[in-house]
Structure formats: structure tokens, C-alpha cells
Amino acid sequence: MIGFRLLTLIPVLAAVAAGLFAAAAYSPFDPLAGYLGNRYETTSEADKALLARELGLDTPWYQLLGRWFGRMLTGDLGMSRGYGQPVSQVVAERIPWTVLLVGVSLTMAVLIAVTLGVWTGMRRGGLVDRAVSTACVVVQGLPPFVLALAAIGIFAVGTGWLPPAGLTDAGADPDVAQVLRHLVLPASALALSQLPWLLLAVRESVSHNRSEDFVTGAMARGVDATTIARRHILPMSLAPFVTILGARLPELVVGAVLVEEIFSWPGIAGAFVDSATDLDMPLLALLTVGTTGAVMLGSLLADIACVLLDPRVRADG
């Protein structure tokens, strides 16, 4: 099963790339508009046609796709027309900041979800459980950009406790203290956007497993509730949690793009948006195919982890 999904990864990514190049060819947006900027309106049609030929913009999309695949096979990621830099440099400068943001956000969401999920699942129907469940339902209906704007309004504009945007204060060097201080709001907003689904998955799984025979037997032997939750219920509840985590990966990617844009975080999202606006195909194709591949691999890893965590899934398969 794992081998089959790995084999399907390549044709799926190839189909995504082909669809992207074809869609760009029929897009109403003129890539020269992004390339020329303010000069676009004053440039004659003859000069636009000449520039389009020089940049290869008048080449059929399937030929552009073939060239892009050929360069990829040789390790040449091409030049970003919008940034005037090699695509590899654009990605290398920005991807570490995106990894930092997503890694911290996901860690926060997982730790809070497991902690509160176990607590509420073991005490279902209690005051804390009702309060947490209500909060999750409310947050589920709010898109990440609303949570981000609310965080800025409360903690940056309202109280002034945290900076509203950027990697550092104006003119400051990006040292650890500066980066961490500016990371708090975007990471918290992104974590909060993913938290309800993860928390409710743990809560439901813990609540279900609490009534299983092995838990009843442990209680009959006098094992305390904390030990039962840690050694018996939690391990059996992690498999559904990991499954939900894998299913949420596309939403996490979209949320990271929105949060990075709102907080002016110097990650890959800005390059993604700029490349899509300008139809900067070498950069846009790499980011689109790379993101798709990362989501698919993450989903596969989540399924593998689910099988390893829960022997019942392995037996059913």
C-alpha cells in the first residue's frame, strides 16, 4: 500500500504541473503586467510583443512545461522573473522562516489538543468540557485571517504587548529575542486555527476508549485515573488524532499562507502570492508542486503512524 502511494506521487505531481501551466496559458492575467510594473500602460503593443518573445511568454504551454521538467531533472530550478533571482535562492531565503512558523504552530496545537483533549474526554459533560467544546465550535467557524486580525487588534493595537508584523522591529537585527517576540502572534493565530479539530478528535477518542473493557479492568484493579489515561487510553486515542492531523495538512498550508501575509512574515507565502499574481512560472510551478508533494507525503506519514500506533488498523488492513 505504501509503495503504491509512493508510485502515484510522481504522476499526481506531473498532472498538477501540467494543469498549472495550462491554466496559466489561458489566464486573463498578462505576466508582462507584473514584469513591467508601472511601465505596462505606457509600453507599446509592439514592444510588449517583442518582450514576450524574448522572455518566452509566447511559447505554447506544453513546450514550457517540457522545458521546466527538463531543467528540473538537471537540478536547474530556473530564474524567477519577478524577483530577478534564481528560484533556488528565493526558496532558500524564505523556506526556513515558513518551517519555523509552521513547526512552532503545529507543536503548540498538538500539545494543547492532547492535554485538553484528554482532560475533557476523561471528564465529559463537566464544566470544563462544555466550555472547551463551545469554544472549539466558535473557533471552527472563523477563518485564519479573522483570527490573525483579531490577535493584532487585541495584543498589538489594543494592549501593545506584542508587535503586529514583521520579523524584527524596524532597523533591528534578526536575533533570537527579536524573532521569538515577533513569532508569538502569527504562530498563536495559526495554532488556534487548527486546534479545534485536533482537540475534539482527541476528546472523542478518549471518551470512547474510556468505556472499553481494558479500562474497566484497570479501574477494577485499583489503577488510578492518571495512570489509566496515560498508559491505556492515550496510546489507543492517538491513531484517530494522527489521522485528523494528516487530513488537516492542506488547511494548515492555506492557513500559513494567510497568516504570513497578514503578519508580513518573511516566509514562502509572499513569494507564492507574488508568483501567482505575476505568473512567474518557474517559481510558481516549484512552489505549487512542492507544496502538493509535501502535503501528500505528510498524509502518507500520518497513515503510517496511525498503523504503528494502533495494531487494530494493521489487523483490519
Image (tube, grey):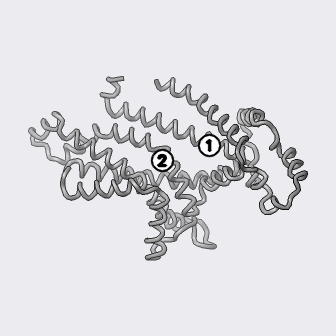
Between 276 and 23, the residue placed more toward the observer is: 23
Q: Amino acid at mark 2?
A: Glu
Between 82 and 230, the residue placed more toward the observer is: 82
Vertical comparison of 24 with 145: above or below = above
- What is the quadrant of the C terminus in the image? top left
Q: Position of residue 143 (x, y in %)?
A: 46, 56
Position of residue 78 in the picture relative to residue 138 (left or right): right
Between 18 and 210, the residue placed more toward the observer is: 18
Residue 78: image quadrant is top right
Which residue ends up furthest to the bottom in the rendered image?
Answer: 159
Residue 209: image quadrant is top left
Give the residue pinned by disc 2: 251
Q: Amino acid at mark 1?
A: Thr
Task: Name the residue at 74% across, 39% down.
Answer: 76
Task: Name the residue at 71% across, 36% down.
Answer: 72
Vertical comparison of 259 with 61: above or below = below
Badge 2 element: helix
Q: Position of residue 96 (x, y in %)?
A: 58, 52
Task: Name the residue at 54% across, 40% down.
Answer: 294
> How many numbered discs sit on the rendered protein?
2
Give the residue pinned by disc 1: 288
Badge 1 element: helix
Badge 1 or badge 2: first in the primary sequence:
2
Q: Position of residue 147 (x, y in %)?
A: 45, 61
Q: Residues within 10 Å of mark 1 (few under 14, many from 20)?
A: some
